[in-house]
């Protein structure tokens, strides 16, 4: 240890230590001289004798200095300085190499950091590797289970060392004290054993136990996250026992969880944990209420197959007791088809992973290709550079430098390029992650705001080092493998640098570009296909939003809602205002069972149809074609019941009837002929309102005035005004409506549609970006090889022209050469692209994996790029003056 | 000339032990003093290039066996003094034992040649 410190000190105080050594040696010599003079020598004799006895002064000092500090570091430093000088001399080369690498490394770092967060990062809990997620498949909903089913699973101590349940993380109103300023916080309802099973300790106070989660509404308690405690409560221990208001419930704080623990969802960070039994979802004990996500700690002695088999049995028994005798046969079959699936749990529970995991995997593969292409590009540049420096290298070899030393010098240069490239790449990655996060809908959470991760940094350094070796070692070995004598003698004409190797590299580069461009084409075409789906309504620029009422809101929400709609409707520049539930692309669903007298379909059993509650002018507002009439002011609670149905409804129940808008249906499904009549007054086009890829199903629209809706519908505004102007009006009116009302889900319907296809948009955008990048790299590579090739063949071309070859012949020759390289790349690349397309098939919409447009386009684009890259060299070749070229020869 | 021929080159690695042993018995020394002592003790039989002393001193200091500080010499001149550390003393003991063993072994071989 003292050694290290001493050496580090020596490293920084070299000049001063040199002075001290001089002084020390000087004194030594002086003392020796004095000694010799005492023995009777003359002054000059004494000086000479002292020098003789001491030995070589300079040599001693050098030996001393060589030992000081870190000798290898200093020689490395010398190499670095040399390499830097070399790079400064060719800034074009340095910039091209660093930019290529920065793009490759940046893209990889950005995508990997997303991939790592969502797919790889282990939860910061005890033994995360023992955790599995239990996911319900088939049936309804997205994997969640009911409380009774959870209790059955959690009771299986023969399989698990504890099973926890959470209902996910939701943004809710939060205030640190009763009556305090309201903010938002992320709330998670959890089972009583949550912290204990995960092995999380409290910083202060205590965490939940099973006792805290016995009876609905029993224990209004809260555990705070460490971050919330730090930021909102200044880490004050007095927070224990105080009350906070979370989603309008007053809860007592009993503890603060250990730092770093933020719940079990990678894309969301929980601020407050509350016992499951405090939810206000209503029927928490019902077996039909699906709302919990379980995470189980498998006993280490139980093989996973046994867990799987046991869960299959448990699930079937559970489903039979619930659905055994009741419900119609179709519904029962659907219900009994459900299974419990075991999934990886060490990385937490993520909704986002379901949609985004596969696209991220594809992106990771794409950026790996980009990096490979970038490495090839740099290798190509290095080869050219090595060839240009042949004379210098030959000189050094003949002056006695070893080859190993020269390889080390060359590698130092590549290391510098890699270091600069990765530093710039990390900057690019930060920007890229922000750009990609912009594609995520707000409801998806934001997994990517977290600080740079060590694993990500390690990944970046690893790929940078691997790239440096990949692109650096070959050229370093190649350019130093020269016979010094020949190298010195060569006339300088042979400067193309391993022409065959360089051509092979360019072909590989073209092949990678083919894959990237073809995939970009596929994703782009897929996005176009999605965009061109007829959604059944025209006005996508309609503004949609929702009023969020305090849960303890007294009285109904219709009055404030209507008041706001009236104000908006009277605002100049607003054409129409309407409202609906479920809104367009707003999530939520509603259905109803009906009878349609005269239809075979409902003769024996009632039918289940989708349902939308709307106010007057809804179809006008969204721009949907309608036969018959819309609802209007005259459709009141007292007037005859009316409905509008969609075309799918007509196809299903009233097929072939001339006047479906003159028929009626009944929401009273007790008898085949129905009860109270609801007249169908209009038939509207099929509107895809939940998703572009949604299957069209029969749907009934009912007026809000005639059927009760117990939650606020979406408000829709068709306007010439900007969204900001409309928002200003809404925010101005808001306080007049009542205290605590907030605006949520604000945006145009087009934004909502964009959010619903964010994976495809992201793939198309990034795929396109990477495709263009690959094309640029390929173009640079082609250009380099073509122009060096031309320079080498200048003499030959001169002879051809002297012998009567025309300009066009020369241009054709060069372009033909470029096309040959591209042809090679296409032949290699197309099978690869085809395999890649097959792999991403499930992410494509409305097109084949072997999409003629994407593949044909790829070929055309690459040929165009090749011709473009070869044009300048061809032009130069054709402008060769035969006389000069020949004289040069 | 005859004396010169009788002088011995310093065996690799033995200079370290000589320096340590000298410092252990004589206390803190500056470079010249140390060189003088080593010459004296060897009875002038060593061909010591005094310059080589300094890299050796730095090496020993890196290993933590000696430490140096600037002080004032007998005739009031600023000089760098070297002294042995506790670790250095332990090292002397260890190396002395090893050296004694080597000498004993070599001695036996010498006697072998004598008896033949």
Image: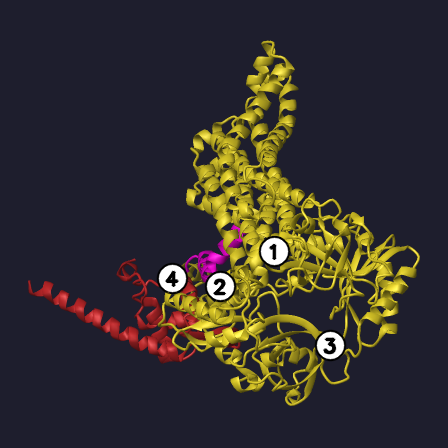
Residue A39 visible somewhere in the drawing: no
Colouring of the image: by chain
Q: Tell whether position A214 is magenta.
A: no
Q: For the residue carrying disc 4, how many other residues have a C-alpha within 10 Å: few (<14), some (14-19), or many (20+)?
A: some
Counting from the top left corner in percent of width and height, residue A477 is at: 44, 40
Image vertical order of residue A834 relative to residue A811, above or below: below
User: What is the letter of the red chain?
Assistant: B
Q: Which residues are magenta?
A: A55-82
Kindly identify which numbered label has been placed on residue A336.
2
What residue is disc 1 on? A426
What residue is pinned by disc 3?
Answer: A551
Same subunit: marks 1 and 3: yes
**Label 2 neighbour load within 10 Å: few <14, some 14-19, many 20+:** some
Judge by depth and name the residue closer to the eye, A720 or A401.
A720
- Which mark is on residue B49? 4
Q: Colour of chain A?
A: yellow
Q: Which quarter of the image is occupied by the N terminus of chain A?
A: bottom left
| Residue A829, disc | none
Q: Are marks 1 and 4 on the same chain?
A: no
Cα separation, mark 1 vs mark 3, equals 45 Å
Secondary structure found at label 3: loop
Q: Residue at x 92, y 60 (%)?
A: A571
- Residue depth check, mark 1 versus mark 4: number of the one nearer the observer: 1
Tell me the CA gap for discs 1 and 4. 55 Å
């Amino acid at each position: 240890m003292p050694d290290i410190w001493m050496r580090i000190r020596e490293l920084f105080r070299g000049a001063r230590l040199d002075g001290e050594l001089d002084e020390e040696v000087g004194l030594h010599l002086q003392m020796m001289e004095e000694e010799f003079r005492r023995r009777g020598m003359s002054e000059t004799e004494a000086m000479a004798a002292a020098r003789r006895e001491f030995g070589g002064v300079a040599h001693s000092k050098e030996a001393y200095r060589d030992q000081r500090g870190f000798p290898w570091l200093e020689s490395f430093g010398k190499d670095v300085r040399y390499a830097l000088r070399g790079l400064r001399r060719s800034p074009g080369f340095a910039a091209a190499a660093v930019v290529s690498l920065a793009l490759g490394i940046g893209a990889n770092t950005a995508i990997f950091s997303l991939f790592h967060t969502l797919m790889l990062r282990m939860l910061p809990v005890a033994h995360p590797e023992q955790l599995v997620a239990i996911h319900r498949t088939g049936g309804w909903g997205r994997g969640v289970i009911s409380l009774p089913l959870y209790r059955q699973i959690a009771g299986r101590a023969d399989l698990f060392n504890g099973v926890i349940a959470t209902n996910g993380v939701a943004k809710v109103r939060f205030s640190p004290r009763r009556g305090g300023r309201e903010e938002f916080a992320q709330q998670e309802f959890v089972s009583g054993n949550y912290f204990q099973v995960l092995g999380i300790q409290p910083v202060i106070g205590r965490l939940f136990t099973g006792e805290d989660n016995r009876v609905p509404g029993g224990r209004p308690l809260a555990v705070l996250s460490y971050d919330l405690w730090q930021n909102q409560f200044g880490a004050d221990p007095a927070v224990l026992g105080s009350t906070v208001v979370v989603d309008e419930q007053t809860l007592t704080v009993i503890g603060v969880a250990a730092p770093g623990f933020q719940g079990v969802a990678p894309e969301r960070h929980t601020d407050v944990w509350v016992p499951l039994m405090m939810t206000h979802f209503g029927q928490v004990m019902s077996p039909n209420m699906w709302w919990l996500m379980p995470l189980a700690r498998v006993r280490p002695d139980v093989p996973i197959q046994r867990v799987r088999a046991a869960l299959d049995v448990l699930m079937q028994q559970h489903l039979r007791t619930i659905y055994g005798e009741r419900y119609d046969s179709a519904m029962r079959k659907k219900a009994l088809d459900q299974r419990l699936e075991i999934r990886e749990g060490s990385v937490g529970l993520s909704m986002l992973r379901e949609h985004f995991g596969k696209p991220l995997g594809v992106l990771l593969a794409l950026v790996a290709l980009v990096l490979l292409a970038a490495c090839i590009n740099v290798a190509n540049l290095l080869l050219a550079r090595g060839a240009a420096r042949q004379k210098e290298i030959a000189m050094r070899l003949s002056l006695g430098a070893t080859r190993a030393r020269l390889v080390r010098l060359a590698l130092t240069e590549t290391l510098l390029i890699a270091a600069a490239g990765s530093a710039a790449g990390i900057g690019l990655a930060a920007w890229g992650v922000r750009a990609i996060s912009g594609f995520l809908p707000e409801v998806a959470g934001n997994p990517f705001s977290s600080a740079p991760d060590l694993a990500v940094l390690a990944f970046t350094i690893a790929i940078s080092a691997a790239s440096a070796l990949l692109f650096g070692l070959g050229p370093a070995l190649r350019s130093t493998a020269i016979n010094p004598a020949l190298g010195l003698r060569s006339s300088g004409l042979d400067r193309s640098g391993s022409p065959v190797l360089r051509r092979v590299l360019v072909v590989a580069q073209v092949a990678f570009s083919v894959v990237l461009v073809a995939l970009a084409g596929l994703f782009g075409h897929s996005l176009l296909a999605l965009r061109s789906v007829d959604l059944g309504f025209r006005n996508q620029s309609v503004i949609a939003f929702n009023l969020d009422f305090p849960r303890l809101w007294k009285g109904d929400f219709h009055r404030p809602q209507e008041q706001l709609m009236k104000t908006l409707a009277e605002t100049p520049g607003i054409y129409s205002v309407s409202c609906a539930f479920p809104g367009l692309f707003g999530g939520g669903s509603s259905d109803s069972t009906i009878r349609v007298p005269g239809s075979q379909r409902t003769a024996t059993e009632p039918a289940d149809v989708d349902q939308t509650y709307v106010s007057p002018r809804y179809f006008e507002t969204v721009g949907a074609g309608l036969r018959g009439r819309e609802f209007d002011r005259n459709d009141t609670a007292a007037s005859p019941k009316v409905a509008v149905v969609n075309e799918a409804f007509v196809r299903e129940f009233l097929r072939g009837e001339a006047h479906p808008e003159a028929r009626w249906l009944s929401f009273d499904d007790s008898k085949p002929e129905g009860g109270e009549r609801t007249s169908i007054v209009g038939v509207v086009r099929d509107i895809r309102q939940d998703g572009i890829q949604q299957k069209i199903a029969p749907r009934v629209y009912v007026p809000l005035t005639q059927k009760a809706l117990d939650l606020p519908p979406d408000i829709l505004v068709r306007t010439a005004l900007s969204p900001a102007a409309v928002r200003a009006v809404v925010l101005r009116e808001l306080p007049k409506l009542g205290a605590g009302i907030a605006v949520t889900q604000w945006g145009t319907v087009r934004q909502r549609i964009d959010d619903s296809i964010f994976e495809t948009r992201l793939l198309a955008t990034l795929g396109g970006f990477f495709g263009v990048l690959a094309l640029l790299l390929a173009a640079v590579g082609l250009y380099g090889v073509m122009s060096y090739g031309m320079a080498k063949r200048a003499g030959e071309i001169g002879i051809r022209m002297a012998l009567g070859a025309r300009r066009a012949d020369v241009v054709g020759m060069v372009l033909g050469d470029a096309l040959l390289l591209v042809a090679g790349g296409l032949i290699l690349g197309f099978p690869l692209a085809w395999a890649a397309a097959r792999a991403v098939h499930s992410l494509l919409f409305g097109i084949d994996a072997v999409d003629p447009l994407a593949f044909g386009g790829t070929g055309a684009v690459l040929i165009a790029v090749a011709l473009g890259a070869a044009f300048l060299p061809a032009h130069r070749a054709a402008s060769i003056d035969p006389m000069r070229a020949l004289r040069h020869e | 000339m005859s004396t010169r021929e009788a002088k011995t080159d310093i065996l690799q690695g033995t200079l370290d032990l000589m320096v340590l042993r000298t410092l252990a018995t004589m206390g803190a020394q500056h470079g010249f003093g140390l060189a003088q002592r080593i010459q004296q003790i060897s009875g002038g039989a060593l061909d010591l290039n005094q310059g080589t002393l300094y890299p050796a001193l730095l090496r020993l200091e890196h290993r933590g066996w000696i430490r140096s500080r600037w002080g004032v010499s007998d005739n009031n001149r600023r000089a760098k003094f070297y002294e042995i550390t506790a670790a250095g003393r332990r090292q002397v003991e260890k190396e002395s034992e090893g050296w004694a063993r080597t000498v004993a072994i070599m001695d036996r071989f010498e006697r072998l040649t004598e008896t033949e």
